[in-house]
Image (cartoon, coloured by chain):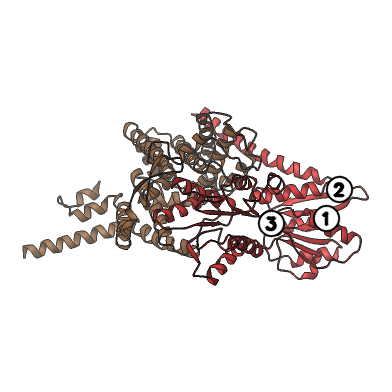
Amino acid sequence: MPNKKAMPPKTPLWARLTKHQIIIPIAALLLLALFNLIADPSFFKITLKDNSNGDPVLSGNLISIIDNGSELAILALGMTLVTAASGGQDISVGAAIAISGSVMLRVLCGSDSRSETLQAPIIVAFLMACLVSMAFGAFNGSLVAFFKIQPMVATLILFTAGRSIAAWINNNELPIVKDESFAYFGNYIPGIPIPTPFLIAIACFIITWLIMKFTNLSLYVQSVGINEKTSRLNGLNPEFIKLMTYVLLGLCVAVAAFIKVSRISTINYSVVAKDIEMDAILAVALGGNALSGGRFSMGASVLGAYVIQFLTTTLYKFEVNAAALPAYKAVVVIILVVLSAPTVREKLSRLGKKLHKNKAAAETA
Amino acid sequence: MKMKKLLAVLSSAVLCAAMLSACGDSDSSSGSKSGGKSSGDLIKVGIINNDPNESGYRTANDKDLKEAFSEKNGFDASFAYSLKNDEQITAAQKFIQDEVDYLLLSAADTAGWDSVLKEAQDAGVRVILFDRTIDADESLYEASIVSDMEKEGDTAVEWLKGQNLDSYKVIHIQGVMGSAAQKGRSGALDEAAAADSSKWEIVAQQTAEWNAEKAQQIVQSVIDQGKEFNVIYAENDDMAKGAVAALDKANISHGVGKDVIVMGFDCNKWALEELLAQNWNYDGQCNPFQSSYILDVIDKLENDEKLDKKVIVMDEKGFDASTITQDDVDKYGI
């Protein structure tokens, strides 16, 4: 690490901070929070109220953010791995959510899209959806790993065909699950005032953290992403690792789809999770991860996902004109992405060092 | 190692094959309907539509057309589906070469149809537009059967005015901005709100892009701010459903005689059932059943009668939860 040697032993705090990848999404979050605090402090109010079933639930803007950001945060986990290993992104996650959600409802409803009772236990439907979604992940992954197709092109196939496949799964019908317990996973479990999607997301984070800590996955993924040839020389199998990241993303997709269909107990395959792939990629970028692969930080991506949701909720709160909403979003995103670009961070840290030196010089004088 | 590679290649090949064969199935099923065997007195019809998977509306529309233009009813119908204009134009050219008697068209895009419709005219093929209009000279087609989205909005807003509330505080959830349905359905509400600002207030106006979860977030956000409202005007059923999910979460009662009036559009069967259960108040129809109108037009043309007018606007209903019946649900639900 020649970089580290070149640095003086006592690095200024500013420079040290800008070196850390996670600082960008944290700064973005703080910035958004500060903006809301100044504009309207009631933004942060959280209240405990009863819902229409009489169960106490927490509500407020912050709760909405952690609730609605869950799917994106879970997808960001898988997308970070895929990005790091294959140096490209999977643009088919939205379509894959439609497929896996449709599978879930198909298993739950059986052949009758309006069935009054569940035709199968929820866990069976969920596992089935996981399998299907991982199979599609493996399809994407093998195109990328074995056929060396550009990830974006490889996943374009499923991006195009996915929603039609989802339509076939349910014979073009829009099934509705009437059983109340299915809605727990996208809303609240009676007696627990915290939104279930957030709990599911937390569980995913913990599992991912354990995997990262106790296996070599993270190291392998990074080395494949940085240099495929040398990692092969070191006894890794780059194809297999790439394939695996896509399969893991498939798993994340299934969990996200589960939350999505549970929220309203039905699915509309043509609009469900529309454009979520772009938000997931954005979350990875906001986390300061290089989209060309290599080193990555899961935590930063997850925070990136919540930044996006924070931004959406803020824009809703300030009643931005519907037609202008994407433009506002774009402006903020451009600023964040530019700030999180490695070259800009490098410049900032150099600037910090310079300031520090000047200050030191002034002090000695 | 080799084995693994082989396995992976094989499995991806199988997946590919599965996808393709699935495609093939649907193609052949629609193709078989067309069948080359046109007997003498069948009327030959080529139907170009948007992809039936696009929405529940389109699925109902396609089903309705398939039932109407059956061999039993004296038709030999071929179907072509695409959401892309150029593919639709190619299909139209093919139908003209096949010498169909009638070409029924729901165009993906309004522009670019002049030359192919002229071809049709020269070949003696009569063109009937349904569901969507195009930017072409009226002489190029016999009739155009459309929904009037402005009228749908007007009907809904008139109904809302008829509720005689002391004040109207509306959360307005819009569809994809710029789409015909969004423009028509938004227009009427905007007008009403502007005309009587002492009574009407749009509490929030935001696009959920036809998406239920986005609608839920938008309504959630209004609730989080502690704003008062008593009407939810959602431009389709999905978004109304999402909005209702947010209301349930916050323990706000909705439906007939409750705190919040819920309005939706499109008349999905499940939505009409919500009306029947008094959970929603109003659902506006966007009529996908155009076949009876088309059959009527063809009848007249076959008998050399003149049509009264080229543009035929379909009757579209609005359902009120207090008067809806099970029969309505079965008949008009899509």
| Residue B216 drawn at (x, y percent) | 48, 50
Nearest to the observer: residue B185 or residue A49: A49
Residue A236: mark: none
| Residue A362 drawn at (x, y percent) | 10, 65
Rendered residue at 46%/49% (across/down): B252
| Residue A109 drawn at (x, y percent) | 60, 34
Look at the numbered disc 2 and give the secondary structure of its residue. loop
B111 versus B96 height, above or below: below
Q: CA distance from mark 1 to mark 3?
A: 21 Å
- Between marks 3 and 2 in the image, the one whose residue lies nearer the viewer: 3
The image quarter containing residue A30 is: bottom left
Nearest to the observer: residue A21 or residue A101: A101
State the residue position of label 3.
B317
The local crowd at label 2, few if under 14, some if 14 to 19, many if 20 or more residues have their Cα within 10 Å, is few
- Between marks 1 and 3 in the image, the one whose residue lies nearer the viewer: 3
State the residue position of label 2.
B73
Side (left or right) of A163 relative to B137: left
Chain letter for mark 3: B
Could you say which chain is coloured red in the image? B
Side (left or right) of A195 relative to B235: left
Marked residue nearer the N-terminal end (1 or 3): 1
Identity of the amino acid at label 1?
A: Leu
Colour in which chain A is shown?
brown
Identity of the amino acid at label 3?
A: Lys
State the residue position of label 1.
B295
